[in-house]
Amino acid sequence: MDFKLMLTTFTMVFLAELGDKTQLATFAFSAKNSARLSVFIGAAGALVLTSLLAVLFGGIISRVIPENYIRMGAGALFVILGIWMLLFSGGE
C-alpha cells in the first residue's frame, strides 16, 4: 500500500469537502434531526460509495482517455455545474 498516496488523497479530499454543498447538507440534516448518528452514517456511506465509484470509473476511463483530458473535462464540468446552480437555484 502506498501510504504517501493515501495521505495525499485523504488530505486533498478532506480539504475539498470542507464547506462544500455535501457538508452543508449534512450540517442542515443534523441541525434538523435529533438522530445525528443516522445522519453521520448516511453521509459517510454516501461519501464512501461515491468515492468507490470515482475510483472504479477513473481506473476504467483512464485506459481510454488521457489524464490531461480527464482533468480538463472535470474542471469544465465543475464550472458548468456551478453556473447551473447559480442560474437555476429554484428561487431560493
Image: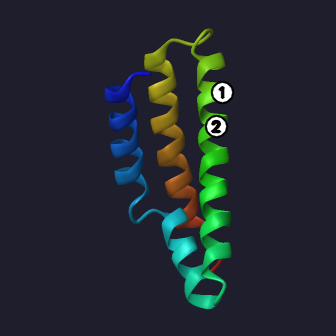
Q: Give the farthest residue toward the front.
A: 1
Whole-percent x and y of residue 82? Answer: 50, 56
Q: Position of residue 78 (x, y in %)?
A: 50, 45
Compared with 14, 56 (above or below) is: above
Query: Crowding at label 1, few (<14), some or many (≥20) Cα neighbours within 10 Å?
Result: few
Query: Can you tell which mark lies on residue 79?
Result: none
The answer to whether residue 7 is above or below residue 83 is: above
Q: Which residue is mark 2?
A: 52
Tell me the residue at 43%/56% (across/down): 17
Type of amino acid at the residue the image marks with label 1: Leu
Q: Are marks 2 and 1 in contact (CB under 8 Å)?
A: yes
- The image quadrant of residue 35 is bottom right
Locate residue 68: give its quadrant. top left
- The quadrant of the rendering that contains the N terminus is top left
The residue wearing badge 1 is 56
Residue drawn at point x = 55 percent, y = 88 percent: 31
